[in-house]
Amino acid sequence: LPAAVPQAAFDRAAPRPAEDATGTTHTLVQRFVVPFSYPVVFTWDALTPSNRALVDALTSREPDRRHRVLVVADAGFVQAWPEVEAAVGQYVTAHADQIELVASPLLIPGGETCKNDPSVASGLLQAFARHRLDRHSFVVTIGGGGVLDAVGFAAGIAHRGIRIVRMPTTVLGQNDSGVGVKNAVNAFGSKNFLGTFVPPFAVVNDFRFLERLPRREKIAGIAEAVKVSLIRDGAFFSWLEEHADALAAAEPAATATMIRRCAELHLQHIATSGDPFEHGSARPLDFGHWSAHKLEALTAHELRHGEAVAIGLLLDSRYAVLRGLLPVTAFDRIFALLSRLGLPRYTDALRLRAPDGRRAVLAGLDEFREHLGGELTVTQLCGIGQALDVNEMDPLLIEESIRWLETKHAEEAGR
Ligand SMILES: NC(=O)c1ccc[n+]([C@@H]2O[C@H](COP(=O)([O-])OP(=O)(O)OC[C@H]3O[C@@H](n4cnc5c(N)ncnc54)[C@H](O)[C@@H]3O)[C@@H](O)[C@H]2O)c1
Ligand SMILES: [Zn+2]
């Protein structure tokens, strides 16, 4: 915590009629710090009554009270896990002395649909009002990154913040999106245009939920682990190389280790970067994302977020080679790892042109800057596990990087 504001500052701020003469200006400086802390639990079978992770998370702050809970679940997830609705009821009944459900679980559409359709967030807000949730109530949200984002946003603005407990059900949700502080929905054609920085009350990751995730979703989520290893932890990158086959086969132990380390690196960044709510211009965790977000939009979200990230980080890594920042041997390792994991290295959306003839993906750079404001700041690699910020991107070198990916793709397709 910073040093307390000296008493003298308050003394100076006390009314001093002589100084309040018409025409004088006084400034009071308001200053305080709010510490945040939340548990991120990794477990199996979280809804088995004997597993206390969830009930302990819900009751950690006021163990002697009975807490009101509304569960909001991803309809796509519930389709794959129909038994979960009954399991929620049994879990709450088993812990009825400490928690109660205000209603049966509410289902909302999964994926980008719930972030694109404004009636989802407004329907959630109506439900919060109907069930008289207050700031001490809990919204427990179970689902993929899309649902976590939309429910987190609605919970963050109702009563200026209802407590949220996230139970991410995708690889990407568990290793990245579900453990951080950002929540958002899309609006006015812009991804994440409406959003909040609201940390969760707790996160409970249940590895069991990943078993029925489509293979494509499992693989897509690994891209965020490759990303964070590249900017933060070269040893983790080597570990990913050593376990690439197990990860590509979605082997549970390797997947769990990958998720834990990736989540840990994200949490460390948020806690230690000095800018958890992104007031500055740098966003190292968004390495590869300026093009990724655009490629997702250009494919109408057919390309999964993680898949777009894989292509985006490859594009920026090639750029770093051309700029003389990254040794080509490092690039070759990145390309080889993504290939072995079964992540895409190319999409036809890279070919699309805007009406002015420019590559459509380049607009992603402008949108990246606009979303944040301030100076364009793009994270680039200077080694495996080593990143630096640059404030300009040379369009000719981006073009050359895209051409390289195109040529490589054509070569691989021709084989
Ligand atoms: N807030 C953040 O910091 C942050 C970070 C990264 C990504 N995101 C957002 O996360 C979203 C992507 O999330 P995602 O990759 O988790 O996928 P997703 O939420 O789009 O879900 C993918 C699909 O899987 C289904 N599903 C979810 N869990 C399942 C399970 N266990 N078994 C079977 N099916 C299941 C969903 O219904 C959906 O159809 C994007 O909107 C992205 O912008 C947010
Ligand atoms: Zn991402």
Image (spheres, grey):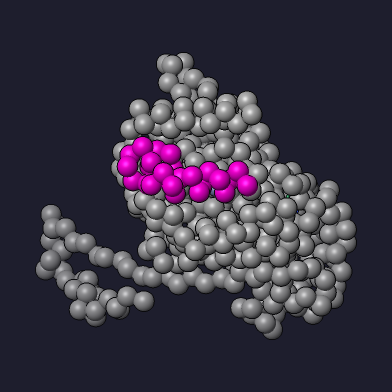
Q: Who's the residue at 43% across and 39% down the image?
A: 318
In the image, farthest residue toward the front = 415
Q: Who's the residue at 65% across and 70% down the image?
A: 41
Residue 175 image position (x, y, % from top left): 60, 58
Q: In this view, does 369 lie above or below 29?
A: above
Pick the front one: 23 or 183: 183
Could one spot residue 152 in this view of the protein? no
Image quarter in which the C terminus is found: top right
Q: In this view, does 83 lie above or below 376?
A: below
Quarter of the image holding residue 174?
bottom right
Name the side, left or right, on which 50 lies relative to 179: right
Boundaries of the magenta span: 317-340
Q: In this view, does 156 lie above or below 355?
A: below
Image quarter in which the N terminus is found: bottom left
Q: Who's the residue at 84% across and 59% down the image?
A: 84
Residue 194 image position (x, y, % from top left): 53, 44
Decide whether residue 339 is among the magenta residues.
yes
Residue 284 image position (x, y, % from top left): 42, 52
Q: In this view, does 304 lie above or below 277?
A: above
